[in-house]
Amino acid sequence: MEEQLRQAFKYLNRVMVPLWRLGLGPLINIWPSVGGQIMVIMHIGRKSGLRRYTPVNYALVDGELYCTAGFGKISDWYRNIKAHPQVEVWLPDGWWAGEVAEIGPGERRLWLLRQVLIGSGFAARLANINPHTITDAALAESTASYRLLHIHRTAPCTGRGGPGEYAWVWPVATMILLPLVLRRRRR
Protein backbone atom coordinates (compact mmCIF):
# COMPACT_ATOMS: atom_id res chain seq x y z
CA MET A 1 0.00 0.00 0.00
CA GLU A 2 2.80 2.42 0.90
CA GLU A 3 4.46 1.97 -2.49
CA GLN A 4 1.17 2.61 -4.31
CA LEU A 5 0.66 5.76 -2.28
CA ARG A 6 4.21 6.87 -3.04
CA GLN A 7 3.65 6.36 -6.78
CA ALA A 8 0.35 8.26 -6.65
CA PHE A 9 2.08 11.24 -5.02
CA LYS A 10 4.85 11.13 -7.65
CA TYR A 11 2.18 11.37 -10.35
CA LEU A 12 0.37 14.18 -8.53
CA ASN A 13 3.66 16.06 -8.15
CA ARG A 14 4.14 16.07 -11.92
CA VAL A 15 0.89 18.03 -12.18
CA MET A 16 1.44 20.35 -9.21
CA VAL A 17 4.68 22.01 -10.30
CA PRO A 18 3.30 23.19 -13.69
CA LEU A 19 0.21 24.53 -11.91
CA TRP A 20 2.46 26.56 -9.60
CA ARG A 21 4.44 27.82 -12.60
CA LEU A 22 1.17 28.96 -14.15
CA GLY A 23 0.54 31.06 -11.06
CA LEU A 24 -2.11 28.79 -9.53
CA GLY A 25 -0.31 28.10 -6.24
CA PRO A 26 -2.60 30.33 -4.19
CA LEU A 27 -5.67 28.61 -5.70
CA ILE A 28 -4.25 25.17 -4.92
CA ASN A 29 -4.14 26.28 -1.29
CA ILE A 30 -7.63 27.74 -1.18
CA TRP A 31 -9.14 24.90 0.92
CA PRO A 32 -6.31 23.69 3.17
CA SER A 33 -8.48 21.51 5.41
CA VAL A 34 -9.18 19.30 2.38
CA GLY A 35 -6.31 19.71 -0.07
CA GLY A 36 -3.68 20.63 2.48
CA GLN A 37 -1.24 23.50 2.67
CA ILE A 38 1.09 22.89 -0.25
CA MET A 39 4.40 24.50 -1.07
CA VAL A 40 7.02 23.59 -3.63
CA ILE A 41 10.61 23.00 -2.56
CA MET A 42 13.34 23.57 -5.14
CA HIS A 43 16.36 21.46 -4.23
CA ILE A 44 19.52 20.34 -5.96
CA GLY A 45 19.91 16.72 -7.05
CA ARG A 46 22.62 15.04 -5.01
CA LYS A 47 23.92 13.09 -8.03
CA SER A 48 22.87 15.19 -11.03
CA GLY A 49 23.35 18.67 -9.60
CA LEU A 50 20.13 19.68 -11.39
CA ARG A 51 17.29 21.71 -9.93
CA ARG A 52 14.44 19.52 -8.72
CA TYR A 53 10.97 20.57 -7.58
CA THR A 54 8.88 18.76 -5.01
CA PRO A 55 5.44 19.80 -3.74
CA VAL A 56 5.03 19.03 -0.04
CA ASN A 57 2.58 19.79 2.73
CA TYR A 58 3.73 22.20 5.38
CA ALA A 59 2.84 24.04 8.55
CA LEU A 60 3.73 27.59 9.44
CA VAL A 61 4.41 27.73 13.19
CA ASP A 62 5.48 31.02 14.79
CA GLY A 63 6.55 32.28 11.36
CA GLU A 64 8.75 29.23 10.68
CA LEU A 65 8.17 26.54 8.03
CA TYR A 66 8.03 22.84 8.81
CA CYS A 67 7.42 19.88 6.52
CA THR A 68 7.85 16.15 6.67
CA ALA A 69 9.25 13.46 4.44
CA GLY A 70 6.43 11.02 5.05
CA PHE A 71 8.16 8.17 3.27
CA GLY A 72 11.24 8.73 5.39
CA LYS A 73 14.83 8.56 4.31
CA ILE A 74 14.03 6.70 1.08
CA SER A 75 12.50 9.85 -0.41
CA ASP A 76 14.74 11.23 -3.14
CA TRP A 77 13.95 14.84 -2.27
CA TYR A 78 14.86 14.20 1.37
CA ARG A 79 18.22 12.68 0.38
CA ASN A 80 18.84 15.65 -1.95
CA ILE A 81 18.14 18.11 0.86
CA LYS A 82 20.42 16.23 3.23
CA ALA A 83 23.21 16.59 0.65
CA HIS A 84 22.38 20.23 -0.23
CA PRO A 85 20.37 21.97 2.54
CA GLN A 86 20.07 25.28 0.66
CA VAL A 87 16.63 25.35 -0.97
CA GLU A 88 14.01 27.67 -2.36
CA VAL A 89 10.36 27.43 -1.33
CA TRP A 90 7.32 28.54 -3.26
CA LEU A 91 4.56 29.52 -0.86
CA PRO A 92 1.10 30.87 -1.69
CA ASP A 93 2.26 34.33 -0.60
CA GLY A 94 5.88 34.39 -1.75
CA TRP A 95 9.10 32.80 -2.90
CA TRP A 96 11.99 32.37 -0.49
CA ALA A 97 15.54 31.07 -0.24
CA GLY A 98 16.04 28.96 2.83
CA GLU A 99 18.11 26.43 4.66
CA VAL A 100 16.83 23.07 5.89
CA ALA A 101 17.61 21.45 9.22
CA GLU A 102 16.20 18.16 10.45
CA ILE A 103 14.35 18.16 13.76
CA GLY A 104 15.54 15.21 15.84
CA PRO A 105 13.81 13.42 18.68
CA GLY A 106 12.41 15.60 21.40
CA GLU A 107 9.21 16.75 23.04
CA ARG A 108 8.46 19.51 20.52
CA ARG A 109 9.06 17.24 17.49
CA LEU A 110 5.82 15.32 17.95
CA TRP A 111 3.79 18.51 18.38
CA LEU A 112 5.35 20.07 15.25
CA LEU A 113 4.82 16.89 13.28
CA ARG A 114 1.16 16.93 14.28
CA GLN A 115 0.90 20.53 12.98
CA VAL A 116 2.35 19.47 9.61
CA LEU A 117 -0.05 16.53 9.42
CA ILE A 118 -2.99 18.80 10.25
CA GLY A 119 -1.76 21.04 7.43
CA SER A 120 -1.63 18.08 5.04
CA GLY A 121 -5.39 17.81 4.58
CA PHE A 122 -6.27 14.50 2.93
CA ALA A 123 -2.67 13.24 2.75
CA ALA A 124 -2.46 12.27 6.43
CA ARG A 125 -5.77 10.43 6.18
CA LEU A 126 -4.48 8.48 3.19
CA ALA A 127 -1.73 7.26 5.51
CA ASN A 128 -4.44 6.28 8.04
CA ILE A 129 -3.55 9.11 10.41
CA ASN A 130 -6.13 11.51 11.76
CA PRO A 131 -3.89 14.16 13.33
CA HIS A 132 -6.84 15.67 15.21
CA THR A 133 -7.73 12.54 17.17
CA ILE A 134 -4.70 10.24 17.23
CA THR A 135 -2.96 9.87 20.59
CA ASP A 136 0.63 11.01 21.01
CA ALA A 137 1.78 7.41 21.50
CA ALA A 138 0.02 6.22 18.34
CA LEU A 139 1.28 9.22 16.40
CA ALA A 140 4.86 8.54 17.49
CA GLU A 141 4.53 4.91 16.44
CA SER A 142 2.82 5.67 13.11
CA THR A 143 5.39 8.31 12.13
CA ALA A 144 8.58 6.70 13.44
CA SER A 145 10.13 6.69 9.95
CA TYR A 146 8.98 10.24 9.07
CA ARG A 147 11.59 12.97 8.85
CA LEU A 148 10.59 16.37 10.23
CA LEU A 149 12.28 19.32 8.55
CA HIS A 150 12.54 22.97 9.55
CA ILE A 151 13.05 25.41 6.68
CA HIS A 152 14.50 28.67 7.88
CA ARG A 153 13.71 31.35 5.30
CA THR A 154 16.82 33.45 4.67
CA ALA A 155 15.86 35.87 1.88
CA PRO A 156 12.98 36.64 -0.47
CA CYS A 157 13.48 35.66 -4.11
CA THR A 158 12.34 37.44 -7.26
CA GLY A 159 12.90 37.13 -10.98
CA ARG A 160 12.57 34.28 -13.42
CA GLY A 161 12.36 30.63 -12.52
CA GLY A 162 9.89 30.88 -9.68
CA PRO A 163 6.19 30.45 -9.04
CA GLY A 164 4.02 32.19 -11.60
CA GLU A 165 6.80 32.09 -14.19
CA TYR A 166 4.27 31.14 -16.86
CA ALA A 167 1.35 33.25 -15.60
CA TRP A 168 1.61 35.23 -18.86
CA VAL A 169 -0.13 32.27 -20.54
CA TRP A 170 -3.53 33.24 -19.07
CA PRO A 171 -3.93 36.66 -20.73
CA VAL A 172 -2.53 35.38 -24.03
CA ALA A 173 -4.88 32.38 -24.01
CA THR A 174 -7.80 34.67 -23.14
CA MET A 175 -6.96 37.04 -26.00
CA ILE A 176 -6.86 34.12 -28.42
CA LEU A 177 -9.82 32.09 -27.16
CA LEU A 178 -12.29 34.84 -26.27
CA PRO A 179 -12.76 36.06 -29.88
CA LEU A 180 -13.20 32.45 -31.02
CA VAL A 181 -15.86 31.81 -28.38
CA LEU A 182 -17.65 35.08 -29.15
CA ARG A 183 -17.61 34.37 -32.88
CA ARG A 184 -19.03 30.92 -32.28
CA ARG A 185 -21.84 32.30 -30.07
CA ARG A 186 -22.90 34.73 -32.83
CA ARG A 187 -23.55 31.89 -35.22
Image (cartoon, rainbow, N blue to C red):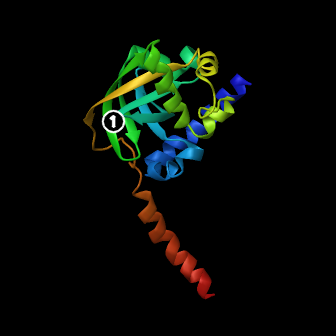
Which sits in the foreground, 152 or 139? 139
Residue at far right of view: 1
Kindly identify the amino acid type of the residue bearing the numbered disc 1. Gly
**Quarter of image, res 15:** top right
Which sits in the foreground, 14 or 118? 118
Compared to 71, does 168 lie above or below?
A: below
Q: Position of residue 180 (x, y in %)?
A: 55, 76
Q: Residue at x 74, y 25 (%)?
A: 1
Q: Position of residue 73 (x, y in %)?
A: 54, 14
Compared to 18, does 184 lie above or below?
A: below
- In screen coordinates, is 116 left or right of 165? right
Q: Residue at x 43, y 64 (%)?
A: 172
Q: Is residue 27 visible?
A: yes
Compared to 68, does 79 lie above or below?
A: above
Q: Position of residue 7 (x, y in %)?
A: 66, 29
- In screen coordinates, is 133 left or right of 22? right
Residue at far left of view: 155
Dot 1 surroundings within 10 Å: few (below 14), some, or many (20 or more)?
A: few
Secondary structure under tag 1 reads loop
- In screen coordinates, is 9 left or right of 84? right
- In screen coordinates, is 163 left or right of 4? left
**Quarter of image, res 13:** top right
Q: Position of residue 3 (x, y in %)?
A: 70, 23
Q: Which residue is mark 1?
A: 63
Q: Residue at x 50, y 77 (%)?
A: 179
